[in-house]
Amino acid sequence: MTHGPLNLDDLRLRARQALEQASSKSQAHLDIQEHDWPGLLEELGIYHAELKIQNEELAEAQSAIVRSLNTYRLLFEYLPQPAVLLDSRGFIEEANARAIAFLGLPPAKALSRRSIIQFFDVESRSRLHPLLRPSPEAGAFPAVRAQVRTGGEGIPCSVQVIHLLGEDTATTRILLVMTDLRAELALRESEQHLRQVLEHSPIPMASYRMNESREVFFINGEFTRIFGYTREDVPTVDHWASLAFPDPAYRRQSFAWWDEAVEHASQQGSPGAACGTRDDRSHPTPHSALLHAGYLLLLTN
């Protein structure tokens, strides 16, 4: 919504009418001498200049408001997440392009005053209803998990509800932002599957982080079965080294080679080094693979 600058002619006409009305009511109390008119005209000129300056400042302030509104509208429209603007009763007033696609709405029906609640399953509605009730304060509620129903398919998502207070309840608006969780859940499921594969692998495996302490964060069952060590026994690579290489000189020699070899582990693997177990049952050869979070150590006899 835009407004042009104030109409000075219309303002002058309304001021003259107000003065005439005031003059007719208090004519008996006015005693303006002829010599007072120049001073009055000067004051009127000053008032006119002040009104002109105020009009320019109002016009500039209004332009700034319009620019801000256009900026926020662009932010809303191009948010990387589905977002809808609701009235105080939870009916859709505006929806960005991602929300229209996410909810499966034809563009022509996107703003047809539909309740946002109807797009969620029954369990999700019970979580969202309290968040959509009128709030005395502006602000965001913690995100909640929900299921969006589109075309018979349930889409897991995270929903953030933000109350935008107006001058009264009728002008209060609610911003609802949705985050599609399908990719995140699929990745989590894939990670769980990979962890199960590593955990039940017939090859002893351990993983450690590429930090100063070289913290061991994973040891599979076969590693514990063969070597007798759990993650509590070897919280870091140094703990494991003191147990696997009891002789200090040999440990220094082996890890000098190890530190050099592990730099090239992701390209060419690493040669073998004798490695003892708790009961000296075997002498496996370690190989390493460079991972995003650290190194995966594979030990073969």
Image (cartoon, rainbow, N blue to C red):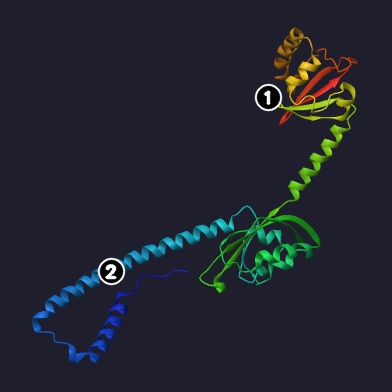
Residue farthest along the left direction in this orientation: 35
- Label 2 or label 1, whichever comes before in sequence order: 2
Give the quadrant of residue 131.
bottom right
On screen, 293 above or below 136?
A: above
Q: Are marks 2 and 1 in contact (CB under 8 Å)?
A: no
Q: Marks 2/1: CA distance?
A: 71 Å
Say which residue appears at 75% left-offset and 62% top-offset. 124
- Closer-to-camera residue (82/198): 198
- Closer-to-camera residue (242/145): 242
Residue 132 lies, in percent from the top left, at 65, 66
Q: Is residue 105 visible?
A: no
Say which residue appears at 80% left-offset and 20% top-offset. 287
Residue 275 lies, in percent from the top left, at 83, 15
Any mark on residue 213, and which?
1
Check disc 2 and report the residue beneath it: 52
Residue farthest along the front direction in this orientation: 233
Say which residue appears at 84% left-offset and 24% top-offset. 229
Any mark on residue 154, and which?
none
Give the quadrant of residue 204.
top right
Q: In the image, 287: left or right of 23?
A: right
Give the quadrant of residue 156.
bottom right
Residue 159 lies, in percent from the top left, at 68, 57
Say which residue appears at 32% left-offset and 79% top-offset. 10
On screen, 114 above or below 224?
A: below
State how many labels appear: 2
The amino acid on which the numbered mark 2 sits, given as a three-letter code, is Lys
The amino acid on which the numbered mark 1 sits, given as a three-letter code, is Ser
